[in-house]
Amino acid sequence: MSSEYLVEIDHVNKTFFTRHVLQRDEDTGKRHFYRVKACQAAHNIAFNIRPGEIFGLLGPNGAGKTTTVKMVSGLVRPDSGTVYVDGLDVDKKRLDVLERVGVVLEGTRTSIWPLTPLENLTYYGNLKNVKGRTLRKRAHELLDFIGLKEKTNIQVRRLSRGQKQKLAICIALIADPTVVLLDEPTTGLDVQSSRNIKDKVTEMTREHGKSVLVTTHDMHVAQELCDRIGIINKGELVACKPTEELLELFSDQVFEFHLDRRAMVEPLETIPGVREAAMDDDDGAPLLRVTVEPEAEVRSAALYATVDALGAQGLLLHSMAQRQQTLEDVFLNLTTTD
């Protein structure tokens, strides 16, 4: 356990068992259970989150993302290993941890629809021991912060899905938690609502120093929002790196040259360190793709020689860039099995 982190997951394991109920025994009148299947939702999971950091947890359906979120929040107890929030053992100090954690779980109707947003925040604030002037002030500040000020006294049932999702985030924040857990926060939202929520998550993390754990299936959201990303597959954490480092790790050494006209590729393929050279079109503009060796010195020499060779052909070089993998490419690379 380190004071450097607000969330620490220390090699946790969790297995769920599916049980089937047999028909009642006619002689004894009892029902019997038997175990059908053991599903390991978390196997030796370990990662941490610093203050002011957004950590993305990605994985296929059933990979263990929501189970991990619930273990951090205290809703699920790990079979082994320890989860710490703000230095507190979640299993031993659950009530103290609940005061420090705000949770938005996918597919749950957090808010009470007959009540207004303000009434919802008042209700949930009281449940978390936030009362009086502090509660009223914080509730209004949150509604203003998230963009629901004009909906303060309108029944939740009359709000759009995006507005309900924003209110769910307000409810998670009403006790001013140091850790915020967001399970699929932008699912089913329109582009504008999704953008607003991403902006608010970034703002509250950077400006207020909260630790945020986000699970999402939207690779674009994760790539744009998260400082670090963990990819979980079949209960195991198969990758955990800063977002840019993760993308770089799986990027091919392919460089794209935008030219004024098509190049002769045969001379380029004789350059030491060049594996392959091929011409393509980018919306009608000539595009040269050159694959080089990954070793830094060889790659550098090959690129310099390629530029010289293009100049020798009298070609105009408009731009050059390394082709980057997307997070979706990395995700599929790590989670797709034959």
Image: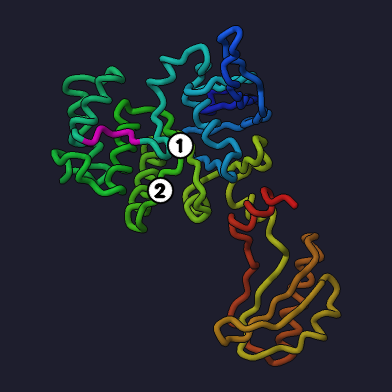
* Range covered by the magenta-colored residues: 109-113
Where does the N terminus fall, quadrant-wise? top right
Q: Are marks 2 and 1 in contact (CB under 8 Å)?
A: no
- Residue ID at (75%, 52%): 338
- Residue ID at (77%, 85%): 265
Residue 250 image position (x, y, % from top left) = 69, 55
Q: Is residue 34 left or right of residue 95?
A: right
> Mark 1 highlights which residue?
212
Magenta stretch secondary structure, dominant: loop
Q: Is residue 57 above or below residue 303?
A: above
Q: Is residue 98 left or right of residue 281?
A: left
Q: Place residue 276 in its image quadrant.
A: bottom right
> Mark 2 highlights which residue?
186
Residue 296 image position (x, y, % from top left) = 77, 60
Colouring used for the render: rainbow
In the foreground, 324 or 128: 128
Mark count: 2
Q: Place residue 297 in its image quadrant.
A: bottom right
Residue 44 image position (x, y, % from top left) = 68, 28
Label 2 to label 1: alpha-carbon separation: 14 Å
